[in-house]
Amino acid sequence: MQTNEQETAMSHTVTQAPTAPEGYFDDLQARALSPGWAKKTPQMWPAPRPRFVPAVWRYADARAALDAACAFVSPEQAERRNLIMVDPIADNIYPTCRNLVAAYQLVLPGETARSHRHSPNALRLILDAGERTFTIVNGVQIDVAPGDVVLTPSWHWHGHSNFGDEPAFWIDFLDVPLVQNLECMFFEDHPQRNEPVTSHEPDSPMRHKRADLERGAREHGTFDLAAECLKTIGVQSIGLARGSRKEARPRIDNNLYTVMNGRVRFTVEPLGAVELTRGDVIAIPCWHAFAIESLSEQAQLIRVSDEPAMRALGFRDVTLP
């Protein structure tokens, strides 16, 4: 039987963990190995830790800056005369949110933005444009007008022309950040610089007209565009009547909202409540709860997201208890 003195002595005994041989960890590092039991920082966590933050870009600011750029940036000098919406986080020089990038673009009357193709998917949301403004997609001339959405799937030739009398402004959305992370980027300029037009399709399935988007949003609240050809990008037209409010819990997809009609209020931390009007864009990265309210009789927004990519990868329906 143990005495009280023996029990007391045992209670103060400290078990020493074995120590690694001298130079063990240096040897691992030299062989590009890392001990999983002693990671420098955690590599998995209980819930998403979004790096990107909610941010707002104003169409009026971008339009004024693009107008000023016309004095020193031409289509011959630049691939595109555009302004990228860069999420304001440390060391970020390009993405608007984790898997998507958006940019305001200007094509002046008489200009043509040369044709190219790339592995990233893309779409254009037309803000302002006069007659005789069009996109060429794989040889097909597709007319565009304000409020339209035009799709450009992966590896399709595309260029843009403005033969009218008014400057054309639109927003480009692409999944370039996703493609960069997957390391499957391909890009090619058209050998003839401007792709020849082989046919004219004003009602191309690549074009979603303003009237259809507005009607779908008004009748259904949320209207999904037939954008399966993009694979990784989802596009929706959303309608809100005055006083109506949409609330969204944290979700894993990343979202970019553009106001097309009316005035709306977004509430999201850390921005708080912000009001947006036509052409303004807000980024709502993953895992941010938010709310949208209409301040007009009828507001319409276009939502662009990476939801299809998340769903295809099997992550869209992952939830917490």
Image (spheres, rainbow, N blue to C red):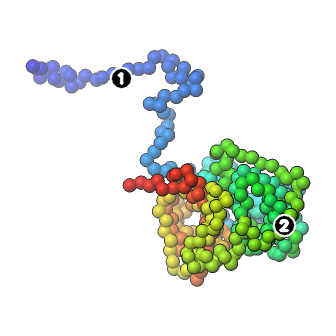
x 86%, y 64%: residue: 198
- Say above or below: 220 vs 318: below
- The numbered mark, 2 or 1, whose residue comes first in the sequence reads 1
Q: Looking at the picture, how far across and down is residue 307, in whole percent?
A: 57, 58
x 19%, y 21%: residue: 9
Q: Looking at the picture, how far across and down is residue 164, in whole percent?
A: 86, 73
SS for tag 1?
Answer: loop
Q: CA distance from mark 2 to mark 1?
A: 76 Å
Residue bearing the label numbered 1: 17
User: Horizontal placement of 63 versus 232: left or right?
Assistant: right
Tell me the kind of residue under disc 2. Answer: Ser
x 58%, y 23%: residue: 31
User: Horizontal placement of 183 versus 194: left or right?
Assistant: left
Q: Looking at the picture, how far across and down is residue 109, in whole percent?
A: 87, 69
- Say above or below: 20 vs 309: above
The quadrant in which residue 159 appears is bottom right
Q: Nearer the viewer, residue 7 or 154?
A: 154
x 38%, y 55%: residue: 321
Residue bearing the label numbered 2: 199
Q: Nearer the viewer, mark 2 or mark 1?
A: 2
Q: Nearer the viewer, residue 199 or 279?
A: 199
SS for tag 2?
Answer: strand
